[in-house]
Image (cartoon, rainbow, N blue to C red):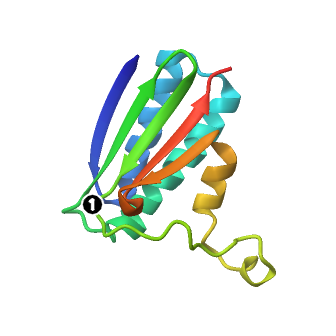
Amino acid sequence: MSTIKIEIPSLLDNIRMIESFIDNAKEEYQLDDGIYGNIMIAVTESVNNAIRHGNKLDPEKNVKLCLILNESQITFIIEDEGPGFDYNDLPDPTAPENIEKPGGRGIFLMKHLADEVSFKDKGRSVELSFYMN
């Protein structure tokens, strides 16, 4: 099992560091393009949510990202320092009244791109797992 961790201040520009982190993981672990694309979108969306909604763009608060790899799956754990949220009570972004809204699709995307998504610590921690075939 391999584990790598990174911690960034809650600045939107730091999403570039997360993208580089994922690019390095792709090279290090020879991830195929399909899983790499899903990881890139789901993890950066989760980090974006942690920065914007969890930590409210407060650069004094950090977002932690941990990658855990074993033979069968790669898991990313994203943690923020915010108050959390009720992840069971989110509007459906595919509902007619929400189709035109510019936001609200992040968790929907994560659930469709990752093989497993789980929220912990009142929504302050998100685990995204991807099966390695």
Q: Say which residue appears at 65% left-offset and 22% top-offset.
A: 32
Q: Say which residue appears at 32% left-offset and 57% top-offset.
A: 80
Q: Quadrant of the N terminus?
A: top left
Q: Residues within 10 Å of mark 1 (few under 14, many from 20)?
A: some
Residue 93 lies in quadrant: bottom right
- Reply above or below: 26 against 100: above
**Is residue 87 found left or right of 33 in the rendered image?**
left
Q: Helix, strand, or loop for circle 1?
A: loop
Q: Quadrant of the C terminus?
A: top right
Decide which of 38, 15 is in the foreground and name it.
38
Q: Say which residue appears at 77% left-offset and 76% top-offset.
A: 95
Q: Say which residue appears at 48% left-offset and 19% top-offset.
A: 70
Estimate the x, y position of residue 7 in percent, counting from the top left: 27, 44
Estimate the x, y position of residue 77 in percent, counting from the top left: 41, 42
Residue tagged by mark 1? 81
**Is residue 19 found left or right of 122 in the rendered image?**
right
Residue 31 lies in quadrant: top right
Residue 18 lies in quadrant: top left
Q: Amino acid at mark 1?
A: Glu
Estimate the x, y position of residue 68 in percent, counting from the top left: 42, 28
Please, which residue is most extreme toward the bottom here?
97
- Reply above or below: 6 against 101: above
- Reply above or below: 27 against 99: above
Decide which of 92, 16 is in the foreground and name it.
92
- Reply above or below: 47 against 89: above
